[in-house]
Amino acid sequence: AQSVTQPDIHITVSEGASLELRCNYSYGATPYLFWYVQSPGQGLQLLLKYFSGDTLVQGIKGFEAEFKRSQSSFNLRKPSVHWSDAAEYFCAVGAADSWGKFQFGAGTQVVVTP
Amino acid sequence: DVKVTQSSRYLVKRTGEKVFLECVQDMDHENMFWYRQDPGLGLRLIYFSYDVKMKEKGDIPEGYSVSREKKERFSLILESASTNQTSMYLCASRKRLAGRETQYFGPGTRLLVL
């Protein structure tokens, strides 16, 4: 069965500083991996996704993520955060079948301080 | 542009009431999903549907039922609402046989059961 762990429930970062959010997954085959962002009161917006190929993927809003098979990780990074990056971030692993069920992590709440 | 809409952003109901949450997508997607989102637990799958009139239980189906009479509409039903069903409910859709595709999310319905 798939599972996703986001070890950090809450992260506080200063504006302009770098950000890294951790995600570890468990999946029997090659996973489809996603990062989503949820601003307060909103639905989930896709930041980026990984299926195969280059292990460093670029997403929207200046985010990137690196897939490391040996560590079963898919960490999200941003070199310099903006106040608008304050949100909740979810990592998800998707099944490679026609149903396309996803397993989500518990989320990481990011607070950006001036 | 991709669009998933949910009938209400906020809903207040009393214990024992029957509650309907509606979700509509305009992308001709076969697969639709209902999640509930709770702090520290991430998104948990309640039910999903892979075609009209077809449904499958997710991870936490107890206390819920669903209806899919038309391809674009997927309804979540709380037969007798209870206070532990107070939560944020998110609907998503996805094209079948598109293993690398993301799920598209609606804005969510925040339900309070008194």
Image: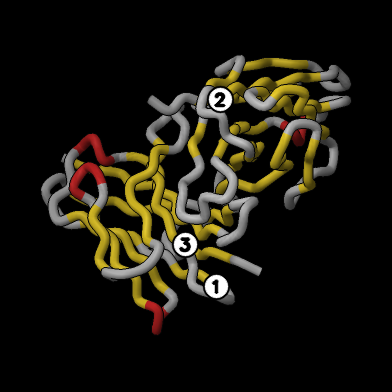
- Residue under the point 59% across and 24% down: B109
For mark 3, what is the residue? A32
Give the x, y percent position of residue B11. Answer: 65, 16
In this view, the mark in front (1 or 2): 2
Q: Quadrant of residue B15?
A: top right
- Residue under the point 76% across and 36% down: B84
Going by the image, does B27 lie left or right of A85? right
Q: Which mark is residue B25?
A: 2
For mark 1, what is the residue? A26
Mark pair 1, 2: CA separation = 31 Å
Q: Are circles 1 and 3 on residues that touch, CB within 8 Å? A: no
SS assignment at label 3: strand
Work out which quarter of the rendered image holds the N terminus of chain B and state it. top left
Give the x, y percent position of residue B30. Answer: 63, 37
Amino acid on which disc 2 is placed: Gln
- Residue under the point 18% across and 48% down: A62
Going by the image, does B58 lie left or right of A65? right
* Closer to us: B39 or A103: A103
**Crowd around label 3: few <14 · some 14–19 · many ≥20 (10 Å):** many
Work out which quarter of the rendered image holds the C terminus of chain B and state it. top right
Going by the image, does B23 lie left or right of B68? left
